[in-house]
Amino acid sequence: MKALLLVDHADEKLQLTEVDRPEPKPGQALIKIKAAALNRRDQWCREGKYPNLVYNCIMGSDGSGVVESVGHAEDTSWVGKEVIINPNINWGYNSAAQSPDYRLLGMPDNGTFAEYIVVNVDRLHSKPANLDMEAAAALPLAGVTAYRAVFTQGHVKSGDNVLISGVGGGVAQFAFLFSVAAGANTYITSSNNQKLEKAIELGAKGGFNYKTVDWPKTALKQTGGFDVVIDSAGGDQINDFIRMINPAGSIVFYGATNGLPKSLDLYRLFWSQGRLQGSTMGSDEEFEAMIAFIEKHKIKPVIDSIRPFDDIISGFNDLKDGKQFGKIIIKIS
Ligand SMILES: NC(=O)c1ccc[n+]([C@@H]2O[C@H](COP(=O)([O-])OP(=O)(O)OC[C@H]3O[C@@H](n4cnc5c(N)ncnc54)[C@H](OP(=O)(O)O)[C@@H]3O)[C@@H](O)[C@H]2O)c1
């Protein structure tokens, strides 16, 4: 079967090649992948910036497909079902934080950028009825990360003033859609005015280009401040967010694309009773709750593009350059 491997070659770390098709053992299922989606994590792996890299494994955390066969007769009811795959492996029993054995599907375990994948049957979920295979493939990693950041950590509710930074991002577009669906007054930032306009069409109350110097002042004046900020860029901008939150407001961050801040305005943070809250992925329960939320509100992920498997590396390149708005989907079969 065709698969995209992470390889340790000097010039290019990705290789689209032929590998053996896996066989399911008892408790597992073989899925024929229909669509997969890219995440920033995949590009971090390509750039050698992800911890504990393992080479010659199949990449990809997100996928939708059809169950082809199972390893044990008791699971035959799954055969023929359209599914999405929960990429959590070993979250554990504590909903507050993942176990030390936690990892994500796709490096080191063989992932979804392949014509077939074998996963444990308990990782399977029926595809949401309101989504086709391509849209469903957008959900897993970005959807659960956004769900936990917005609801479990950010406690976003109707009427809150919420700021989602970098709305072009795969996780950020879900955080934005979830916040709008929850009835919050949702504002966004982006480096690109067209992305801001598109988000306003989709329900944002307003948007700010974070490349403009005075955007935090404008945002504060226009909105009166934010109850919750959801961010993955990190860097020095965190101090702007500290200035922009309302008393007892929260900044939830699930990434640090731009690295660490040179300083942190702790004076203002403690005086405003503010909260700086880290967040990563989400538990299996949050994965289920995310799917239920998507179905209830009939949410359709923002999809940047759908590309053939043979063009998957162009998707990595666009992600690297930040060109996308929403999820880059790969049609596998
Ligand atoms: N903790 C977790 O479980 C988890 C899960 C998924 C992702 N992450 C991390 O979260 C980050 C985003 O991941 P992703 O998959 O959503 O990536 P992505 O699709 O590549 O999105 C990255 C987006 O970041 C935005 N951005 C860049 N610089 C910014 C800045 N200074 N201020 C605000 N936004 C900025 C850009 O938005 P515009 O295009 O709108 O300018 C860009 O599109 C990465 O660091 C990733 O490793 C963590």
Image: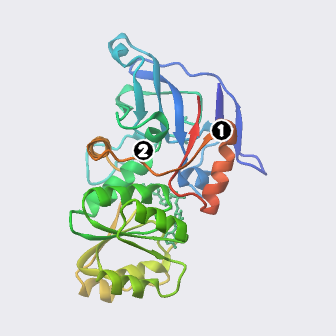
The residue depicted at 76 percent of the width and 46 percent of the height is: 9
The residue depicted at 61 percent of the width and 60 percent of the height is: 323
Residue reaching furthest to the right: 11
Q: Quadrant of residue 90?
A: top left
The residue depicted at 59 percent of the width and 55 percent of the height is: 44
Q: Is mark 1 within 8 Å of ligand 1?
A: no
Alpha-carbon span between mark 2 and mark 1: 22 Å
In this rendering, position of residue 116 left or right of residue 4: left
Amino acid on which the number 2 mark rests in the picture? Leu
Residue 239: percent from the left, percent from the top?
A: 41, 83
Q: Nearer the viewer, mark 2 or mark 1?
A: 2
Residue 277: percent from the left, percent from the top?
A: 32, 68
169 w.r.t. 189: above or below: above
Q: Residues within 10 Å of mark 1 (few under 14, many from 20)?
A: many
Residue 312: percent from the left, percent from the top?
A: 65, 43
Q: Which residue is mark 1?
A: 5
Residue 133: percent from the left, percent from the top?
A: 47, 34
In terms of depth relative to the viewer, which is nearer, 208 or 250? 208
> Does dot 1 land on a helix, a strand or a loop?
strand
In terms of depth relative to the viewer, which is nearer, 216 or 52? 216
4 w.r.t. 149: above or below: above
Residue 139's tag is 2
Q: Earlier in the sequence, mark 2 or mark 1?
A: 1
